[in-house]
Image (cartoon, rainbow, N blue to C red):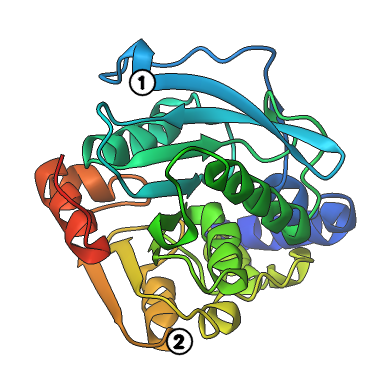
Amino acid sequence: MRPSTAGATRMAMAVLVLIVGPACKLDSLVFGIDAVDAYHLPATVIPDSLRREVSFPSGSETLYGYWLRQGGSAPRLTVVFSHGKGGNLSEDVKWAHAEHLWQAGFDVLTYDYRGFGRSTGTSKDETTLAADASAALAFALAQPGVTIGRVVSYGHSLGSDPAIALAAANAGIRALVVESGFSNGQAMAQSADPLGFPVSWLMREPMLNTTRIATVQMPVLILHGSDDLQIPPSQGRALYDAAHEPKAITIVPGAGHETVEQVMGLPAFRALIRQFTNATAP
């Protein structure tokens, strides 16, 4: 009996994984660099006077990002935003995240991990991601009027790992927001496999987000799309279950991995983030 076409394809792919797997770890895809010489930002509603490209040290490397300020002198909360894998902070999706948070009334620091964008060095593992998030926090705290109790750690997708690590290491942070986050590295690797192979062994980094989020001592908000095909909403629920009170979760019907804000509606998204962090409306 001849195997079906689908079965033959799966068998061929399995052989390919076994042959090239050791040389093609998923870690290389997760931490793959995306270097550019200069940022070319999408069209933005943020005035030039309130948007500044910045750089700061992370170990022996230099990270680059953008410091987005609110107008006026009234004190605001500051979001340290850790973006997802691939690309850099000037990509449409990554810039839109920062822009939406700025429009909600926050000062925002969006930055590139080492090896991404203009940042030097190479992102090798979750240790370097966490170090870069800590460096971003240090830069934010050096800005006038910024205190630890007025900082929100926000991570999207891959950025959930450094965002959670930052919150776990700094109990004084005001709140943690995780959007489209994963429960651990193994689960992320498995959900990213469209053919259903047991490929979790290809992911070296444990990235134990559920374990780490259980140590977080501040309010936690989980956002996830019901139709997220890259990281299923079950992983967002696992993060919520592991977190301590006070906590909240919003599963957005019909939203995918990168469309939570748009499907929810930007006014509703901004109101939710302000309400959860007790921020003043702009």
Residue 225 screen position, x and y as percent: 28, 59
Out of 185 and 270, give the one closest to the viewer. 270
What's under tag 2, amino acid-wise?
Ala
Secondary structure beneath disc 1?
Answer: helix
Q: Point out the frontmost of discs 2 and 1.
A: 1
Q: Locate residue 93, reporting x and y percent.
A: 39, 33
Quarter residue 44 falls in: top left
- Type of amino acid at the residue the image marks with label 1: Leu
Residue visible at 34% across and 87% down in the picture: 245
- Residue identifier under label 2: 242
User: How many numbered marks are there?
Assistant: 2
Residue 70 seen anywhere in this rendered image of the structure: yes
Question: Which image quadrant: the C terminus?
Answer: top left
Residue at the (83%, 62%) spot, across then down? 18
Residue 9 in percent (x, y) is at: 63, 55
Instruction: Out of 103 and 70, give the one closest to the viewer.
Output: 70
Structural crowding at the residue carrying mark 2, measured as other residues with C-alpha within 10 Å and reported as few (<14), some (14–19) or many (≥20): some
Q: Is residue 45 above or below residue 144?
A: above
Rendered residue at 57%/73% (across/down): 168
* Quarter of image, res 232: bottom left
Where in the figure is residue 91, as x and y percent of width and height?
47, 26
Q: Which numbered tag is attached to residue 282?
A: none
Q: Is residue 229 among the parts visible in the rendering?
A: no
| Residue at 49% across, 70% down | 172
Label annotation for residue 50: 1
Q: Nearer the viewer, residue 53 or 162?
A: 53
Instruction: Classify residue 233 as left or right of residue 231.
Output: left
Q: Is residue 192 shown above or below 241?
A: above
Question: How much space separates mark 2 and mark 1, taking CA atoms?
Answer: 38 Å
Residue 130 lies left or right of residue 187; in this view the side is right
